[in-house]
Image (cartoon, rainbow, N blue to C red):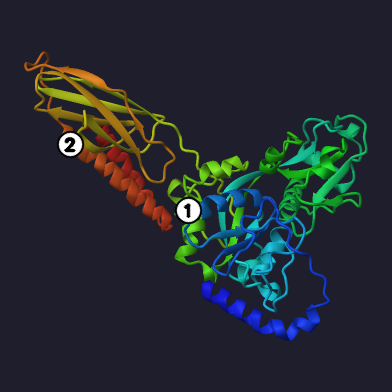
């Protein structure tokens, strides 16, 4: 990546003298910083990003947090609008300035083909890739979930909800007055984002779905407006437009209509050939943007962080296609409840129950001493029996550790005190702790084999039968 940029800079320098006569009189818009620009003076070693206005704020916040670490490379992300070209240090191969690309498509066009600008490293996108982009080797790294809804002015003639059929009718031009759909009288002003906008392409695809998978021909009265700009809408009681829920939440100037919504992933798009370990440390599933540290930053911008692959999601995967996996990084709160008894002389039986039922292991402690470590959870419980315990009061705690691939949170039980007798008050029970642990371990092992088989797209029927038998045995001995 940095070799490519160095070559591009050298070429630009070599060409600049040859083209000075051509460019000297050409109009250039001086760079004007936008609040969503993370760096105003990027250098060749920085990662320069442009594109969608949907994710420009969240990427600015993420860039600020990453850059504060002092870890190279820095993220230089530039807003879709703001006036002026990109900074003078970001140029085309011929040394000329780069106008700010406005929208997902415009940003991605700078990564390939005739419009390729080597100094641009990634494009923000609110829509999935098309076949041309995939063929060019672009990789899409999803990281957040956005929801699209219809937006109106806070004081609007529109009703509080719009059905899919009504939305289609409005954009076809068949419904032209709010009174036709239960609102106050007023001629509807339907709006749609500008050409090249990821939100526009996503919304037209949703219109097609709402119209029985038939393309919707937009009425002549549909106005093209800047994606996620509230000015055309907020003061017009008859305006309506598709709008990002996250962006609308940040603005606070619009009303989101009920009745229809559509989830979508938002991406950062890079050239596949340039995806190095350094790049993955930022955009990948184990990188910063998909980390728990980035979660509150993404939420502060109005979006939800997608879950990582180890939690059943797709955050940070390098995709060649769109995704409908919208599992978010929202761990499920778990409660561990510990109970204990002394069923026989110098013996303690501890039972940790998980709510809700979750996969993982439980470790049992007396003070800071581990009594049993990593006992598997079976059917929502983890059970262990300890022998050779001295007579008297003993206080125990159980700590739950969720399995990888689950969204359960780790949790700790309240302390439980068990009074142990040196003489049996009830007929002694057989200590089947070893059998129980072995049975639970077998259940876990079969689950792991089944998971690998599913991942490899192999049959799992035999594992299903084995798992059923193993669970029955575990229930019997535990």
- For label 2, the SS is helix
**Mark 2 burial class by Cα count in 10 Å: few <14, some 14-19, many 20+:** some
Q: Is residue 125 above or below residue 87?
A: above
Of residues 368 and 383, the one drawn nearer to the viewer in this rendering: 368
Q: Is residue 3 above or below residue 176?
A: below
Of residues 9 and 290, the one drawn nearer to the viewer in this rendering: 9
Q: Is residue 175 above or below residue 425?
A: below
Q: Which residue is mark 2?
A: 435
Q: How far across and down, in percent of the image, does residue 134 sit?
A: 61, 67
Residue plotted at (85% across, 43% down): 170
From this viewpoint, which residue is outermost toward the top?
A: 425
Q: Is residue 282 left or right of 204 when viewed as pictured?
A: left
Q: How far across and down, in percent of the image, does residue 46 sit?
A: 56, 64
Q: Is residue 108 left or right of 368 when viewed as pictured?
A: right
Q: How far across and down, in percent of the image, does residue 86 sit?
A: 70, 64
**Mark 1 burial class by Cα count in 10 Å: few <14, some 14-19, many 20+:** few
- For label 1, the SS is loop
From this viewpoint, which residue is outermost toward the left?
A: 423
Quadrant where the C terminus sits is top left
Q: Is residue 170 visible?
A: yes
Q: CA distance from mark 1 to mark 2?
A: 50 Å
Q: Which residue is mark 1?
A: 69
Of residues 279 and 6, the one drawn nearer to the viewer in this rendering: 6
Q: Is residue 104 above or below residue 163?
A: below
Q: How far across and down, in percent of the image, does residue 317 sit?
A: 51, 57
Residue plotted at (61% across, 48% down): 58
Please tell me in which quadrant of the rendered image residue 407 appears: top left
Please tell me in which quadrant of the rendered image residue 148 appears: top right
Q: Is residue 321 visible?
A: no
Who comes first in sequence, dot 1 or dot 2? 1
């Amino acid at each position: 990546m940095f070799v490519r940029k160095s070559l591009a800079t050298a070429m630009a320098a070599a060409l600049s003298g040859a083209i000075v006569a051509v460019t000297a009189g050409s109009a250039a818009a001086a760079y004007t910083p936008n609040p969503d620009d993370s760096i105003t003076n990027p250098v060749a070693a920085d990662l320069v990003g442009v594109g969608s206005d949907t994710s420009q704020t969240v990427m600015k916040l993420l860039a600020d947090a990453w850059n504060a670490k002092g870890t190279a490379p820095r993220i230089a992300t530039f807003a879709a609008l703001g006036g002026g070209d990109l900074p003078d240090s970001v140029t085309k191969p011929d040394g000329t300035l780069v106008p700010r690309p406005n929208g997902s498509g415009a940003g991605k066009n700078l990564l390939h083909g005739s419009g390729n600008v080597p100094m641009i490293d990634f494009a923000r996108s609110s829509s999935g890739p098309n076949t041309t982009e995939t063929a060019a080797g672009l990789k899409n790294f999803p990281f957040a979930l956005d929801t699209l809804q219809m937006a109106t002015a806070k004081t609007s003639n529109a009703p509080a909800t719009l059905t899919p059929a009504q939305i289609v009718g409005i954009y076809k031009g068949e419904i032209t007055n709010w009174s036709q759909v239960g609102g106050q009288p007023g001629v509807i002003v339907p709006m749609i984002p500008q050409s090249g906008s990821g939100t526009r392409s996503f919304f037209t695809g949703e219109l097609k779905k709402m119209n029985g998978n038939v393309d919707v021909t937009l009425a002549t009265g549909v106005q093209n407006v800047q994606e996620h700009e509230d000015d055309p809408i907020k003061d017009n009681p008859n305006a309506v437009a598709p709008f990002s829920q996250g962006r609308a939440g940040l603005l606070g100037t619009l009303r989101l209509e009920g009745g229809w919504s559509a989830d979508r992933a938002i991406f950062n798009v890079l050239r596949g050939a340039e995806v190095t370990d350094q790049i993955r440390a930022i955009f990948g599933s184990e990188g910063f943007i998909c980390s728990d540290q980035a979660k509150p930053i993404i939420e502060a911008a109005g979006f939800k962080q997608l879950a990582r692959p180890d939690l059943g999601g797709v955050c940070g995967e390098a995709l060649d296609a769109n995704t409908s996996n919208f599992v978010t990084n929202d761990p499920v709160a778990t409660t561990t409840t510990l109970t204990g008894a002394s069923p026989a002389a110098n013996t303690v039986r501890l039972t940790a129950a998980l709510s809700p039922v979750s996969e993982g292991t439980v470790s049992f402690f007396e003070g800071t001493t581990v009594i049993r470590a990593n006992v598997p959870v079976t059917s929502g419980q983890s059970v262990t029996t300890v022998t050779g315990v001295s007579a008297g009061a003993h206080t125990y705690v159980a700590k739950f550790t969720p399995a990888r691939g689950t969204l359960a949170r780790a949790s700790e039980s309240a302390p439980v005190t068990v009074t142990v007798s040196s003489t049996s008050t009830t007929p002694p029970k057989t200590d089947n702790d070893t059998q129980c642990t072995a049975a639970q371990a077998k259940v876990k092992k079969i689950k792991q084999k089944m998971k690998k088989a599913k991942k490899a797209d192999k049959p799992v029927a035999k594992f299903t039968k084995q798992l059923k038998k193993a669970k029955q045995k575990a229930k019997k001995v535990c």
